[in-house]
Amino acid sequence: MSRSILLISTFLFMVWTGCTDQRTSPGENVIASVSGETLTMQQALDQIPSFLLQQDTLSAVHSYAGQWAQRRVVTDHASRIGIQNTPEFQEKLNRYHDELLEQLLREFIINEHRDQLEVTTEEAQSYYQNYREQFRMGERFVRFRHLTTQTRAEAERANQDIMNGVDWEEVVGQYSVDPEYQLRHSTQFWPVSMALTDMPALHQNLQILGITERSPIHYFGGQFHLLQLMEEKTEGEYPDLEWLIPQIKEWLKLEKTRRITNAYLRNLYLQADANNEIELLNVTDIEQLLTE
């Protein structure tokens, strides 16, 4: 889901919860309440991202309950002073309503044509052969291991395990704050200019590390970080087809999605126009109105 749609969904959720009374059935475990409105354990578990629950379930639930209570206090106050009755509120609500409808229609179109969006390996290979020169790398690409731990002691033990030849998957599973993501991340190549740019010290390390070399342990964002450079592709090389095929498949799938969605929406417009449902002033009339 895109960031804009996530914001729209959150806004509409707040509107809905601000206009309804959340009640619970007997036997449900209530973990927070504000002015008679309640949050149950199950409701919280349904809303919290799974990776946060895997890291620390207790902390994630407690934090979500606190955020829920704060949001309820804010929206209750907004309702009491009549924010929902203002023209500004209604105008924004209508706009978010329309944007959400459009987004959900696009998702419906994609789901209805899902069988047409699949991209075969043969299609991806053919695309690569036809546009091979476009894939020549314009800069150095790197594949690296990035381990993030909660404590320095864990980072040091992980570093020692790597040096002793312990399997990377085992190291990540034991020490990483997000094992699934960091394991997947370590299998991909990244343009060195874009890798870890939000962590300047780590980004700088990638510029100078040699193959299999490990970085010093860095403290950043309340956590400890360790890097190990595994492979590199120099500027001017062609990337390995095995590495490139999944990316080409994703590009072609996005292109098919765009083409099918645009065709569907275009047909909707043409049908509405043919049924005389659309009235548009011509350029001359609009210009005249603007000058009046």
Image: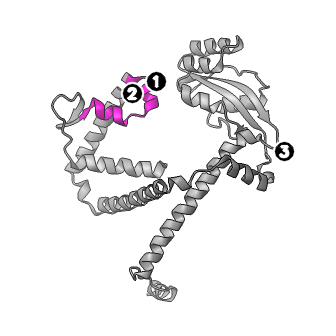
Q: Tell me: 274 left or right of 191.
A: left
Distance, label 3 to label 1, CA atoms, is 41 Å
Which one is earlier in the sequence, the residue at label 3 or at label 2? Answer: 2
Asked if 280 appears above or below 107 in the picture, the reply is below
The magenta segment: 39-57
Q: Amino acid at mark 2?
A: Ala
Is residue 58 magenta-colored? no
Mark 2 sits on what residue? 60
Where residue 191 appears, as percent x and y from the top left, is 72, 40
Distance, label 2 to label 1, CA atoms, is 8 Å
Where residue 246 appears, as percent x and y from the top left, is 66, 43
Where residue 286 appears, as percent x and y from the top left, is 47, 84
Q: Mark 3 or 2, which is nearer the eye?
A: 3
Q: Looking at the rendered structure, which numbered label has been put on residue 157?
A: none
Element assignment for label 3: loop
Element assignment for label 1: helix
Labelled pair 2, 1 in contact (Cβ < 8 Å): yes
